[in-house]
């Protein structure tokens, strides 16, 4: 039977193609022509980073029972509202772990060794006049990971190959890793050269990295954020960069994407990428496949492959 879905963000091309091939009808929440369609919609689809679903939107969609996200983060979903309605949220954990961790290391190398600036220097013809200014070594430095989950662990593994000392901060210490645990972010920042943000976004992690944490990271320290911009206090970060309270930052995520403040873009000690952590063909295909598997399982009433932790059967009985 043809199923009616509604997209709550732009959809990646692999997912759009797969939905078309499997005969789903996909409505766009921004352009509902037929109000009747709202009652036909039984599932929402969208990306992890862009989808916003709240009580107001759900009140217009009486028959929605699934939100299938193509991405790992789900901080845009009002979990109280979906739990009240018995709606299940699925995501695509694990599919992008390696790519996001690769980008984190890429940003560490790029900002530490000033690779984009060196490229610009050469293209500009400046090499003929003078040598490029010396940078500092990245290998062997101390890296602190805020949020030692799937991506955090993959970053730690890569950092070890660069002979770095790894420490981490999270809600609880992990028994299965040899890295030093810090109960608070400021203490972790004080102990490292690179502070890497790898937690989910949302209210619980909002501004965990604030002015005090940046002060602790210090003038030789770099901040890397491949997770969510909300974890970092934007005003405090821009100020810390302008005052040289920290040495620099490598950022893949921004507070009002795709808009990036001119003030941040004008700084030379930052490396900025347009939220491309999971942006490889391999990962995007895997993410689309897993999203489709969740949709299929939902409509044939089988166990969902990857519900978010709050929607797993064991969390209902806990
Ligand atoms: P994950 O496996 O759930 O890991 C998240 C980690 O954050 C866990 O270790 C968790 O600690 C920790 N954490 C949660 N709340 C915390 C808090 N209040 N304080 C400190 N630590 C906290 O998720 P993942 O797959 O690694 O993904 C992490 C995030 O990366 C996603 O949520 C998403 O926002 C972001 N992401 C970005 C991109 C991109 O394109 N740039 C792509 C994919 C994902 P516990 O172990 O204590 O629960």
Image: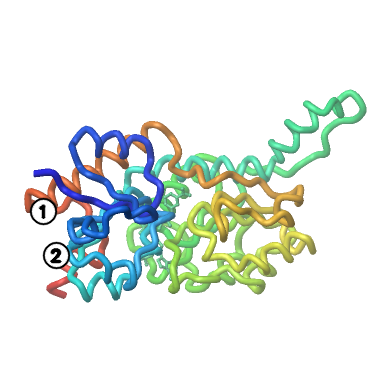
* Residue 297 against residue 54 in the figure, above or below: above
* Residue 136 against residue 196 in the figure, above or below: above
Residue 177 shows in this picture: no
Residue 180 at x, y percent in the picture: 48, 62
The residue at 49%/62% (across/down) is 146
Ligand 1 lies in which image quarter?
Answer: bottom left
Quarter-wise, where is residue 225 in the image? Answer: bottom right
Callout 1–callout 2 Cβ contact below 8 Å: yes
Q: Earlier in the sequence, mark 1 or mark 2?
A: 1
Which quarter shows the C terminus? bottom left
- Residue 22, which numbered label? none
Residue 217 at x, y percent in the picture: 66, 64
The residue at 57%/65% (across/down) is 232
The residue at 76%/33% (across/down) is 120
- Residue corresponding to mark 2: 313
- Residue 303, which numbered label? 1
């Amino acid at each position: 039977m043809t199923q009616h879905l509604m997209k709550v963000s732009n959809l990646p091309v692999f997912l759009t193609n797969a939905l078309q091939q499997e005969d789903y009808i996909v409505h766009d929440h921004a352009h509902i022509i037929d109000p009747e369609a709202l009652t036909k919609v039984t599932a929402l689809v969208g990306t992890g980073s862009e989808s916003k679903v709240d009580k107001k939107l759900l009140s217009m969609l009486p028959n929605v029972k699934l939100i299938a996200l193509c991405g790992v983060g789900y901080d845009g979903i009002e979990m109280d509202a979906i739990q009240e309605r018995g709606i299940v949220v699925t995501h695509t954990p694990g599919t992008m772990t390696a790519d996001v961790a690769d980008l984190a290391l890429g940003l560490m190398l790029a900002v530490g060794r000033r690779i984009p600036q060196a490229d610009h220097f050469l293209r500009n013809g400046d090499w003929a006049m003078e040598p490029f200014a010396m940078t500092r070594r990245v290998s062997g430095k101390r890296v602190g990971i805020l949020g030692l989950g799937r991506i955090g662990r993959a970053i730690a593994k890569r950092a070890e190959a660069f002979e770095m000392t790894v420490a981490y901060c999270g809600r609880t210490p992990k028994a299965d890793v040899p890295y030093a645990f810090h109960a608070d972010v400021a203490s972790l920042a004080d102990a490292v050269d690179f502070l890497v943000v790898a937690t989910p976004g949302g209210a619980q992690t909002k501004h965990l990295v604030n002015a005090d944490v940046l002060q602790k990271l210090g003038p030789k320290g770099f901040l890397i954020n491949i997770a969510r911009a909300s974890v970092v206090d934007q005003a405090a970060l821009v100020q810390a960069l302008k005052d040289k309270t920290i040495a620099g930052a490598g950022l893949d995520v921004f507070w009002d994407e795709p808009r990036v403040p001119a003030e941040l873009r004008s700084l030379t000690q930052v490396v900025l990428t347009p939220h491309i952590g999971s942006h490889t063909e391999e990962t995007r295909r895997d993410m689309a496949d897993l999203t489709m598997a969740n949709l299929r399982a939902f409509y044939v009433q089988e166990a969902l492959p990857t519900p978010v932790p709050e929607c797993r059967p064991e969390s209902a009985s806990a």
